[in-house]
Image (cartoon, coloured by chain):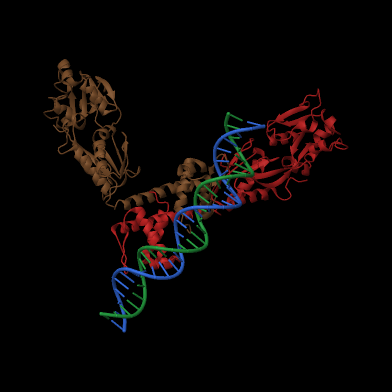
Chain colours: A red, B brown, C green, D blue
Amino acid sequence: MIDPRFAEHLTVFVDVVRGGSFSHAARRRGLTPSAIARQIDALEHSVGVPLFVRSTRALAMTDAGERLFERAQRLLDDLADTHAEIAAFDGAVTGVFRLACFPTFGKRYVIPAVEAVMRDHPRLSVELDLTERLADPVLERLDAVIRIGELADSTLIATRLAGQKRLLVASPDYLSRNGAPADRASLAGHRLIDKLHGADLLGWADVLGHPAGHRQDAGVVFRCDDFEAMRGAVLSGIGIAFLPDWVVGTDVRAGALLRLTLDSESGAETGAESWNMSETGIHLLRALAQPSAKFRVVSGAIRTVIGTPPVWAA
Amino acid sequence: MIDPRFAEHLTVFVDVVRGGSFSHAARRRGLTPSAIARQIDALEHSVGVPLFVRSTRALAMTDAGERLFERAQRLLDDLADTHAEIAAFDGAVTGVFRLACFPTFGKRYVIPAVEAVMRDHPRLSVELDLTERLADPVLERLDAVIRIGELADSTLIATRLAGQKRLLVASPDYLSRNGAPADRASLAGHRLIDKLHGADLLGWADVLGHPAGHRQDAGVVFRCDDFEAMRGAVLSGIGIAFLPDWVVGTDVRAGALLRLTLDSESGAETGAESWNMSETGIHLLRALAQPSAKFRVVSGAIRTVIGTPPVWAA
DNA sequence: AAACCTTTTTGCCCGGAACGCAAAGATGAT
DNA sequence: ATCATCTTTGCGTTCCGGGCAAAAAGGTTT
């Protein structure tokens, strides 16, 4: 078949058959009879067979026309069905929603959101990829990805979910036993809890700096790749940790942990002091410029779970 | 559906999916990538849903795209089928005729027929698919398929081209050196030539049976998947073969090969003796009930080449 | 039998759609 | 870091398709 417009011609063909005349079909479509005639001409030429026996008064179909009419109806119906089915993807909150984010964040804030979404939209299923690595929405066919910290990708569309601050925290118990560090230098003498892997997130090195001759991990007594476990370690008084507010914010507010402030952050060290003040973001990234209905629903649910201001805010 | 070009866009859509990129599809169609992009844009706009997640390097389909691709393929096939069916009403023998059959049969009997057809109908082109597997006319969009042996398909229309018998043959040279087998049992001591693959055709197992403790391939010294090569092997005196009459019939008549008959085929073994007597058929199968002009021409040409009775008949 | 009406066809013209071209933005590879 | 490939977008041009009008054809009415 070398006729790109075969289907298009087919629609006017069935119109003509149904209407019983070129003129009728023309009126029905808001065209002139000549336009119809040309379409039928093109169709007949493409197929190499006359479809109508032309007479000015009554138009009769040939065998080929008869057969074509039978098949064309089903064909066009199928075409319309398909179009409708695909169009139904718009606005529908069904199918599967694929999302990737860090394990800790996912477990604490995404799972409740998923639960809420599913209650409202039973026909939506969710695939949650809990991974430390930076997932790519387009390469991995993800509907959305949660990024915490700076965002580099340019083509991706980011929606800000909340801010993020890093907090220096310890348990009252630990502080009563070891005292609170007054400045950055005195931190080195304390028992520190650090993050394993996930270099994208700030670690102690960014707080302490890298003094020459000073082991970078001096004082670090516990190291773990799981934020939740780190939180548990701080809560049980193992030491001082530097954790995102969405991990320990509620503990600070509840008094289970105390936030520490260091005196050293004054004077000319405006740049260095930012380690404890700078607020990076938590973003929901997507590949498509126009968010799908699924996306909006999930995005809204996560926002609701996080709250405004965030449940972890002081 | 208010998109007259839906089907047209669909064709480029599947082209893009199959090709894996806009550029590939553009080259394949002799267009520029921009033209393709616009068509896809139009399709996405018409359907109201993004079909691809655009990234310069890899293009991924959305769920909607995935689903559309599934349906579009069948849809376009049906469209092409319809077009072809209606075009078949034209008595003119033009366009392309697609035929599938076994390699050996095709090379020996179809090629000459094709040559004859083309002499009479220069505007007809032929696609001949030489394959051992059983091709399906409707699935593979073939105008006809040649089946040798029993035919199982019910919906397909079969036209008998000729009968087929299996002949037990050897060269005079071989027989003078090794003697002729008197009965089935003595066959086991001979040098046998067997068919590789193509289990649909009878093999030695059907002749010898499977006596307990007797290796099924005992005595088989040459095995090949090509009838023509097997014929060559028998002609050069390698051993005894069990080949269709359309392969070795002319050799037998010319005296280059001798047909063997076994004494054992008497008495109560009427069922078993049929191995050498039963005549199955060679059929031309088509999907459409009403044969097209092309079909009739090709069918006639193949019949002519085969002759009545077949050129290979004793 | 003639006039009339409806329908189809054809020639001509025009408007718009689609394509090519080129440049820009982006991303993976060398 | 440079290169190459791929997609997108703006602009210009070309060609297709539709409208209009006239003509041809066949049926109906007077």
Q: Residue at x 84, y 30 (%)?
A: A185
Q: Residue A260: tell me if it is visible.
A: no
Please tell me in which quadrant of the rendered image residue A71 appears: bottom left
Q: Nearer the viewer, residue B52 or A246?
A: B52
> Please, is residue B274 above or below residue B175 in the view?
below
Q: Residue furthest top?
A: B177
Q: Which percent across, then down, holds residue A198?
A: 68, 33
Q: With B146 as the anchor, is A163 left or right in this view?
A: right
Q: Which percent across, then down, holds residue B161?
A: 21, 40
Q: Nearer the viewer, residue B122 or B159?
A: B122
Q: Residue furthest left?
A: B267
> Please, is residue B41 above or below residue B314 in the view?
below
Q: Residue B160: tell me if it is visible.
A: yes
Q: Which percent across, then down, holds residue B118?
A: 27, 41
In the picture, the quarter occupied by the C terminus of chain B is top left
Q: Residue at x 21, y 22 (%)?
A: B235
Q: Nearer the viewer, residue A221 or D16?
A: D16
Q: Which percent across, then down, holds residue A286?
A: 62, 45
Q: With A20 as the anchor, is A88 left or right in this view?
A: right
Q: Residue furthest right?
A: A267
Q: How many marks?
A: 0
Q: With A37 as the anchor, is A254 left or right in this view?
A: right
Please tell me in which quadrant of the rendered image residue A73 appears: bottom left
